[in-house]
Image: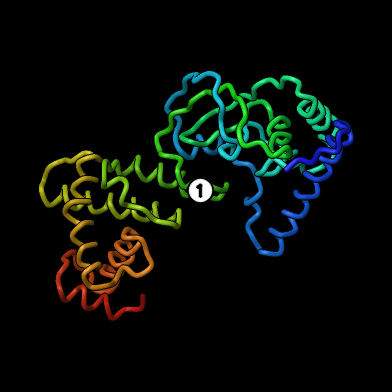
Amino acid sequence: MSRDTGFPRADAEADFLRARRRQVLSRLAKWLRGEPDDVNIMLPFHEVVDALGYQGESRVGLRVIRLDSIVGSVDRGRDFDRRFRPTSGRVRERWERLALAARRGEEIPPIEVYRIGELHFIIDGHHRVSVAHALGLSTIEANVIGVRTKLDPSGIRYRGDLIVKDYRRLFLERVPLTGHARASVLVTDPWDYAKLGEHIEAWGFRLMQDEGKFSDRAAVAQRWHDEEYVPVVDMLRQADMIGSRTEAEAYLWVAGERYRLIRTHRWDDDVIEALRTTKH
């Protein structure tokens, strides 16, 4: 929380020094915990949009938004960390000028942000957000532009999460699942989406060969989910073979083992028993 000595200029200077100190302590704590480099980095707006798939945008207008919903920036500047604490003394003069104005009760212009889901990305107003955090505020006025994306942005916390979202977007373009099927097929390793996509395309190719007719991607995706994925996952669940994996990860593992060990397309008790004896 901000402190007040009765001298706004001195308080504004102290606000900046306190924010800088907290940023340095946060970096030190991250290093001691061995956390990845992207923990304290703002999410880059354009990378998020690329990962989720851009569909369109519209002006929402002036809104009051929560400061903790602002997670990223349109530019790639490094003047502030993820919590909008100054990363150097370079921004000090402008930062203290805004802090002084805020402490004197002067009107501060709204910031400008993009909104994706519940997340906000600054177009203009980094210093104002940083000062608002330092003064202990929880909300700020913003002119908002809403951005629509193909994928839901929920689950994004750090820059590294974008890799998973990007691979999932590509996977769903290759395997256009819908509804519950779309929501339930999840993996944690981005590369697994590529492997699963290849597997499903191969399954669809065999299906078309067996039936002697063409099926488009949407039809293959739905039939794979209903005729292959769901029955296999049900068997794995009953055999207690999912463990700590997601259902899709368990399916991908056992499908790979089936071909490696048995070289058959069928699923029966003998196959499941043989797989159970392999190393998890």
Q: Nearer the viewer, residue 135 or 145?
A: 135
Which residue is found at the position 51% from the left and 30% from the top? 115
Residue 43 shows in the view: yes
Q: Position of residue 137 (x, y in %)?
A: 66, 36
Quadrant the N terminus occupies: top right
Name the amino acid, label 1: Ile
Label 1: how many residues lie within 10 Å, few (<14), some (14-19) or many (20+)?
some
At x 85%, y 36%, the residue is 11
Residue indicated by mark 1: 163
Q: Position of residue 55 (x, y in %)?
A: 42, 27
Task: Report the side of 180 relative to 128 (left or right).
Answer: left
Which residue is at 35% across, 78% downward?
Answer: 279
* Residue 44 in sight from this viewpoint: no
| Quadrant location of the C terminus in the rendered image | bottom left
Q: Position of residue 82 (x, y in %)?
A: 65, 44
Frontmost residue, 70 versus 46: 70
Q: Decide: is 134 above or below 248.
A: above
